[in-house]
Image (cartoon, grey):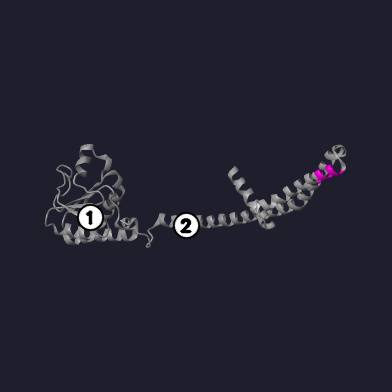
């Protein structure tokens, strides 16, 4: 608060000086000259009338001269300073009012934009093409498999990549029609968490499937526009999917620091 008042006083003083067309020294100098003039005048009177006569009235003469100087200074400078201060404060008030109005308009626009994003995807946002490409990749995976083939998608991810992995697992079901398991994240026992993360690569999504799996290769190529992907050949751990089909099973491993390709491009990586 005091910083604001000090800054306001400084602005008022600058406006005062500007109205006088002088510097701070230019304002103080006349006062110094006035005081020196009084002192010199008293000295001259002292020499002319003698020390004894001067001592009798010097206090009275000095007081009169000082009061006159102060009154004249106040009459001349105080109105100018008051006017400059009022002008400065009013200008700052107007500036703040404009800033507040602009902020209110921006907040209103942000609220409308947030409400729009709460209820639907905006085609101009990166999430829209990311979702389209993701769905298209798994749709083409189903086409490559054949519509009657059974399949399983197993998804694992470290806790920090659980959100992006969960989105992938949930969205792909509608187009792949594969039995889906995961990601389980911290719900898995520590030993199973370690097993799920082994072989994953930070910043990459690994598509694990048997060698020469044409459908898995098609999926990896399609997902390349959504994530940084790499091919892997690890088998899904035994006992993990006891009730799921093991034919056409794909293990999608999200590594730490996994992100959408659009996000990585914005980061400049």
Whole-percent x, y for residue 195 in the image: 19, 42
Q: Is residue 38 left or right of residue 139?
A: right
Q: Which region is colored magenta?
A: 41-48
**Residue 30 shown in magenta:** no
Residue at image coords 27%, 47%: 256
Q: Position of residue 224 (x, y in %)?
A: 24, 59
Question: Which dot marks residue 112?
Answer: 2
Task: Give the quarter of the figure containing the C terminus.
Answer: bottom left
Q: Observer-nearest residue: 52 or 107?
A: 52
* Residue closer to the observer: 53 or 163: 53
Q: Residues within 10 Å of mark 1 (few under 14, many from 20)?
A: many
Left or right: 200 as drawn, with respect to 63: left
Q: Which residue is mark 1?
A: 229
Within the magenta stretch, is there residue 42? yes
Label 2–label 1 contact, CB within 8 A: no
Q: Position of residue 68 (x, y in %)?
A: 81, 47
Instruction: Tell me which numbered mark, 2 or 1, is placed earlier along the sequence.
Output: 2
């Amino acid at each position: 608060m005091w910083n604001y008042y000090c800054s306001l006083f400084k602005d008022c003083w600058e406006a005062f000086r500007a109205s006088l067309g002088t510097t701070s020294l230019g304002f103080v100098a006349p006062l110094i000259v006035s005081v020196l003039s009084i002192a010199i005048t008293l000295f001259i009177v002292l020499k002319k009338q003698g020390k004894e006569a001067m001592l009798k009235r010097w206090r009275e003469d000095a007081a009169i001269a000082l009061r006159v100087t102060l009154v004249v200074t106040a009459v001349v400078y105080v109105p100018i300073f008051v006017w400059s201060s009022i002008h400065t404060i009013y200008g700052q008030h107007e500036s703040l009012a404009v800033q507040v109005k602009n902020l209110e308009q921006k907040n209103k626009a942000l609220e409308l934009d947030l409400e729009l994003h709460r209820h639907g995807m905006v085609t101009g946002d990166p999430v829209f093409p990311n979702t389209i490409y993701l769905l298209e990749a798994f749709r083409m995976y189903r086409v490559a498999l054949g519509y009657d083939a059974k399949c399983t998608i197993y998804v694992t991810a470290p806790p920090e990549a659980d959100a992006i992995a969960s989105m992938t697992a949930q969205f792909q079901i509608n187009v792949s029609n594969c039995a889906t398991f995961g990601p389980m994240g911290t719900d898995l026992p520590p030993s199973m968490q370690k097993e799920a993360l082994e072989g994953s690569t930070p910043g990459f999504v690994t598509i694990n499937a048997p060698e020469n799996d044409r459908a898995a290769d098609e999926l990896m190529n399609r997902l390349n526009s959504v994530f940084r992907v790499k091919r892997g050949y690890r088998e899904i751990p035994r006992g993990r999917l006891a009730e799921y089909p093991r034919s056409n099973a794909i293990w999608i491993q999200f590594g730490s620091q996994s992100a959408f390709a659009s996000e990585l491009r914005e980061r400049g990586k």
